[in-house]
Image (cartoon, rainbow, N blue to C red):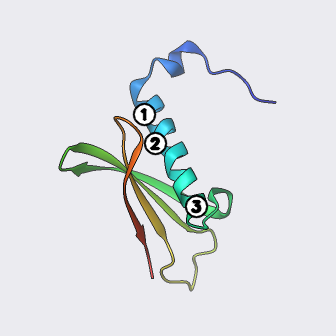
Amino acid sequence: MASLLDSEVLNDDLAVSLARSLAAANRRAHECGVEADDSLITISQIAGDAGALWRVNYGPRDYINQRGGDLIVEVNPADASILRVIRGQ
């Protein structure tokens, strides 16, 4: 059962920005054939031309003896727009 977020979480601009950006990245990953539930997800905040961006990396859960295949989605935290999608080889 889903629970409501308390006001402390909703008033945390960083947490809300990250949640919106992750949801947008998950949608794009799904469109690219990558399921978030099946991925090891790492998130980094990086400096971009227009300020800080969220870089969401979707990698295989079983990454031992496996190279490449990651999907990287860069998201603008201001409006949760997708800036760039990079598919690893």
Judge left or right: residue 2 versus residue 34: right
**Circle 3: is it few (<14), some (14-19), or many (20+) Cα within 10 Å?**
few
Residue 63, horizontal then vertical, whole percent? 57, 76
Q: CA distance from mark 1 to mark 2?
A: 6 Å
Choose mark 3 or mark 2, whichever is in front.
3
Query: Residue at point 43% right, 63% down?
Result: 72
Q: Amino acid at mark 1?
A: Ser
Give 23 or 38, whichever is nearer the viewer: 23
Q: Amino acid at mark 3?
A: Glu
Choose mark 3 or mark 1, whichever is in front.
3
Q: CA distance from mark 3 to mark 1?
A: 21 Å
Tell me, for residue 21, which label it has, or none.
2
Earlier residue among tags 3 and 2:
2
Pointers 1 and 2 in contact (C-beta within 8 Å) = yes
For label 1, the residue is 17
**Circle 1: is it few (<14), some (14-19), or many (20+) Cα within 10 Å?**
some
State the quadrant of the C terminus. Answer: bottom left
Judge left or right: residue 5 versus residue 83: right
Give 35 or 57, whichever is nearer the viewer: 35
For label 3, the residue is 31
Tally of numbered tags: 3
